[in-house]
Image (cartoon, rainbow, N blue to C red):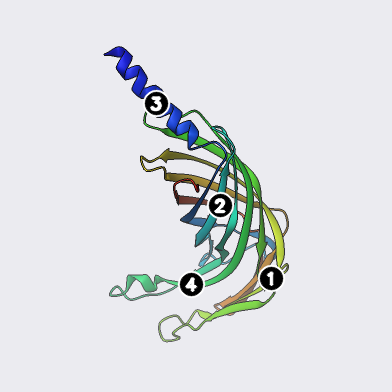
Amino acid sequence: MKKSIFTIFTIIGFLSHAQESDVWRIGAQFGFQGNGAKLIGGDAVADAKFEQHNAGAAGLNFFARYDYNQHWMLLTGFGFSGYGFEFSLSQNYSLLNPDSRRAVLKNDIGTVEIPFMIHYKFDPNCKQTKWIVGAGFTQNLQGSASTGGTYNADKEVNSSINYFTSDVKLSHSLFPTFRFSVGREKILKHGGILNCSLLFNYGFAQNTRATVKYSIDGKEYMHQFGNKGNYVGLRLAYYLAPIK
C-alpha cells in the first residue's frame, strides 16, 4: 500500500515537472490597484474641508510566459492600466442623499504597459500549490495631453465654496517603472495555472502633475501634486495548458 502511494506521488511529481520545463503558456490577468500622489508645490497648508485621496484603478493584461524549468519562469505581454488623482471638499448635504457630503474631482489616466519579468517558483506542496516571486521592468506608454475637472457647487446649499478645479498635465509619454510581485499559484489537473499575486509598481520620475485650486469663504488655495505611477495592486491570472 505504501509503495503504491509513493508511486502515485512520484508520477504526479513527474507530470508536474514535465509541465514546467521548456514550455510556453498564454494567459490573462485582471485586478485592481490603489495609486497615490505626493505634494510637490503650492500651498502646504490646506483648508480643513480639503482632502487628497488615493485614486483607484483597474488593470487588464495578456501574457505569454516561458517556464524554463521547475523554478524559473519569464513573463512578457501587454496590458492596460491606469492611475490618477482624486480630491474632495466636504460640503453641506441633504440627509436624503448622504453621498453628496463630498464634492469630488477625479482625474483618470490610462496607460499601455509592456512588462518584462523573471520569476522564481518555490517547490510545490502536495496540492500542487506554490509560492512565486518576480521582479522586472514595465515600459509604459501614455498620451501627452492635459485634462482637468471643475465642480460647480450649489450656491444655495454650499455658499462657502466659490470654486473647485483641477488641471492635470502629463510630462512623459514613454516611461519605465520597476515591478515586484509575490503570489501563489496552483497547477490544475488539465494543465492550466491559476495565479493570485500582489504587485508593487515603482516609478522613477514625476510623470504627471496635478494643480488643484479652490476658494472657500473668499480665501484661495492652490496645491500641486506629482504622480510617478506608483501603486500596489491585487491581480488574478489564469494561464492555459502548455502549448505543444
Whichever of labels 2 and 1 marks the residue nearer the N terminus, that label is 2
Quick one: label 1, few (<14), some, or many (20+) residues within 10 Å? Answer: some
Whichever of labels 2 and 3 marks the residue nearer the N terminus, that label is 3
Whichever of labels 3 and 4 marks the residue nearer the N terminus, that label is 3
Front residue (pair 25, 113): 25
Contact? badges 2 and 1 (CB < 8 Å): no
Say what amino acid the circle numbered 2 marks: Ala
- Mark 4 or mark 1: which is in front? 1
- Mark 2 or mark 3: which is in front? 3
Whichever of labels 2 and 4 marks the residue nearer the N terminus, that label is 2
State the image coordinates of residue 15 (x, y, percent, origin top left). 43, 32
Q: Is residue 7 left or right of residue 160?
A: left
- The Cα atoms of the two marked residues, 3 and 4, are separated by 59 Å
Q: Which residue is mark 2?
A: 64
Whichever of labels 4 and 1 marks the residue nearer the N terminus, that label is 4
Label at residue 170: 1
- Mark 2 or mark 4: which is in front? 2
In what element is the residue under mark 1? strand
Q: Is residue 60 above or below residue 135?
A: below
Camera sees residue 187: yes
The quadrant where residue 191 appears = top left
Q: Quadrant of the N terminus?
A: top left
Contact? badges 4 and 1 (CB < 8 Å): no
Front residue (pair 44, 83): 83
Front residue (pair 171, 160): 171
Tally the numbered discs: 4
Q: Which residue is mark 4?
A: 104
State the image coordinates of residue 124 (x, y, percent, origin top left). 45, 29
Q: Which residue is mark 3?
A: 11
